Amino acid sequence: MSRYRGPRLRIVRRLGDLPGLTRKSARRAYPPGQHGQNRKKRSEYAIRLEEKQKLRFNYGLTEKQLLRYIRKARRVTGSTGQVLLQLLEMRLDNTVFRMGMAPTIPAARQLVNHGHVTVNGRVVNIASYQCRPGEEIAVRNREPSRKLVEANLQYPGLANLPSHLEFDKNKMLGKVNGVIEREWVALQINELLVVEYYSRQA
């Protein structure tokens, strides 16, 4: 299954607030569908599945990509759940979003894919590129690129810049100073349930 392109608020109503997917908030507080208001008690599996879906939709990943990140996180020493969140947060599209260059992660992915973003002076158009500490992320020095980001900077998706990033709005230049810490992850999620979900699969 390819990336989700359907109504985003439907997903927000089902899974809760997803800051990376959309800036809109749902008017109705219950899940979508005919039986949205009288949902029965959810099973443990359903709760784990929901947490996994939150990750998928917030970061705009396919099932295959998420499974690849899980396997990668398992190979690293430390808490698999935390390593997984770090890998996802350090993606180039998410870093561009967190710097305020785009209002959502899908918008940031489009900026990257269309060649508007440079890493250490070179154009990188791969959204899943893993940003490393010390790298400089900037807007390409072209009129269309700068205008696009200038418009986005008026309405950033999230108000606070995480402690591992810095961004100069005048120069349109950002820097990755380290790896993100758990408390700066904007998504409300229990990553251990995601790891548990995949421990039965992969």
Image (spheres, rainbow, N blue to C red):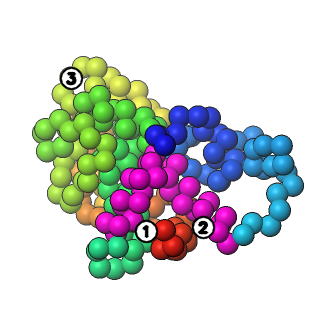
Using a 10 Å C-alpha cutoff, classify the residue at mark 2 as few (fewer than 14 neighbours), some (14 to 19) or many (20 or more): many
Quadrant showing the C terminus: bottom left
Tag 2 residue: 48
Seen at 52% across and 39% down, the residue is 4
- As helix, strand or loop, the secondary structure at mark 2 comes to helix
Residue at the limit of the structure toward the bottom, as seen here: 78
Using a 10 Å C-alpha cutoff, classify the residue at mark 1 as few (fewer than 14 neighbours), some (14 to 19) or many (20 or more): few
Tag 1 residue: 202
Residue at the limit of the structure toward the left, as seen here: 121
Give the Cα distance between marks 2 and 3. 45 Å
Amino acid type at image mark 3: Arg
Pinpoint residue 155: horizontal percent, then vertical percent: 48, 35
Residues shaded magenta: 44-73
Pinpoint residue 157: horizontal percent, then vertical percent: 48, 42
Amino acid type at image mark 2: Arg
Q: Is residue 106 visible?
A: yes
Using a 10 Å C-alpha cutoff, classify the residue at mark 3 as few (fewer than 14 neighbours), some (14 to 19) or many (20 or more): few
